[in-house]
Amino acid sequence: MSKAQDARLREIMASFVRHMHEFAREVRLTEDEFEFGVDFLNRIGQATNDAHNEGILFSDSIGFSTLVCLLNNGGHGATETAAALLGPFWRMHSPVTQNGGSIVRSETPGAALFIECRITDPDGVPLAGVEVDVWQASPVGLYENQDPMQTDMNLRGKFTSDTDGRIWFRSVKPAGYPVPTDGPVGDLLRAQMRHPYRPAHLHFLCFKPGFKTLITQVFVDDDEHLESDVVFGVTRHLVGDFRQGTGTPPADDVTGPWFKLNYTFVMEEGEAKLPIPPIR
Ligand code: BEZ
Ligand code: FE
């Protein structure tokens, strides 16, 4: 590698090779296990397409995505952070939606949820003009691209924070869901005797030039899988306060129970960069 031009490539590959060799020595990897491992990697590639990213799912399921997230946020891992893993379901070009609007775009049974978020800098100063992408699973635990009953882009939207750094919108209370288990990652989870569930959550991606793009999730506080998220995404900081509403609901058409979520995101200074969308 000494001739490679890119110093960072040399550093990463030298370390990677060292750790791979050390790993094989530590577990005394057999030839059969080696073949099995290569086949597993190949199957990850074969299971990946425009609508599904098994590579990210594998990284998520072994806690690697969360580790990389925590190493790169919160003052490069020094402090608590509001960031969490992206996951495989973010899509570019979510429908631009006005504050006060709804991201329920086709009939979606479930409890109404009214969300208000504030976005501030580390000193608590409100940030106006932050573009906030939101995406979530439905109350049956499916993203729109997994569910023929939902219209394209249902439960996805893009908002812009007002002069007080606020966005607000209507949705439905999400449910937890199993990650896709019909590929090699599912085989691995079964072999490990692990359940495949994520606790219910909403995803947020906050983008504003001059600030590090904040990718995160807010979790529903009564979910039974908060302590055992299959992809290790939950931190105490990210558990939201989902209050059941009392009195007159904020909209006339709300019939059953409804909920409110208020949450504040703190963006760090840094580079505003969008991730590569895992799916189209
Ligand atoms: C998600 O939250 O969308 C997700 C994250 C990791 C794996 C699967 C789904
Ligand atoms: Fe999710």
Image: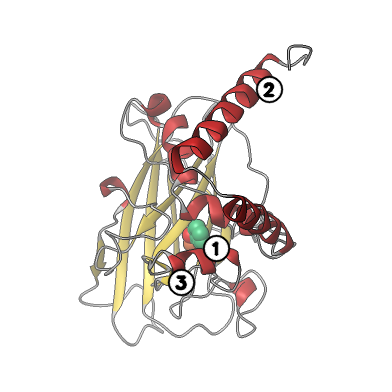
Residue bearing the label numbered 2: 9
Q: Label 3 is placed on what type of residue?
A: Pro
Which is nearer the N-term, disc 1 or disc 2?
2
Above/below status of 69 relative to 263: above
> In the figure, is residue 72 to the left or right of 7?
left
Coordinates of residue 134 in the picture (x, y in percent): 52, 57
Task: Depth check: give the residue in front, 120 or 54.
Answer: 54
Coordinates of residue 263 in the picture (x, y in percent): 33, 51
> In the figure, is residue 220 to the left or right of 205?
left
Task: Depth check: give the residue in front, 137 or 125.
Answer: 137
**Which residue is drawn at the image coordinates 41% and 84% (left, top)?**
253
Coordinates of residue 51 in the picture (x, y in percent): 70, 65
Residue bearing the label numbered 3: 178
Task: Depth check: give the residue in front, 247 or 268.
Answer: 268
Find residue 93 and name its label: none
Q: Label 1 is placed on what type of residue?
A: Val
Task: Identify the secondary structure beneath mark 1.
Answer: helix
Q: Residues within 10 Å of mark 3 (few under 14, many from 20)?
A: some
Task: Identify the secondary structure beneath mark 2.
Answer: helix
Q: Is residue 133 visible in this depiction of the protein?
A: no
Which is nearer the N-term, disc 3 or disc 2?
2
Above/below status of 102 relative to 81: below
Q: Label 2 is placed on what type of residue?
A: Leu
**Which residue is drawn at the image coordinates 60% and 80% (left, top)?**
147
Task: Depth check: give the residue in front, 33 or 154.
Answer: 33
Find residue 185 and name its label: 1
Q: Nearer the viewer, mark 1 or mark 3?
A: 1
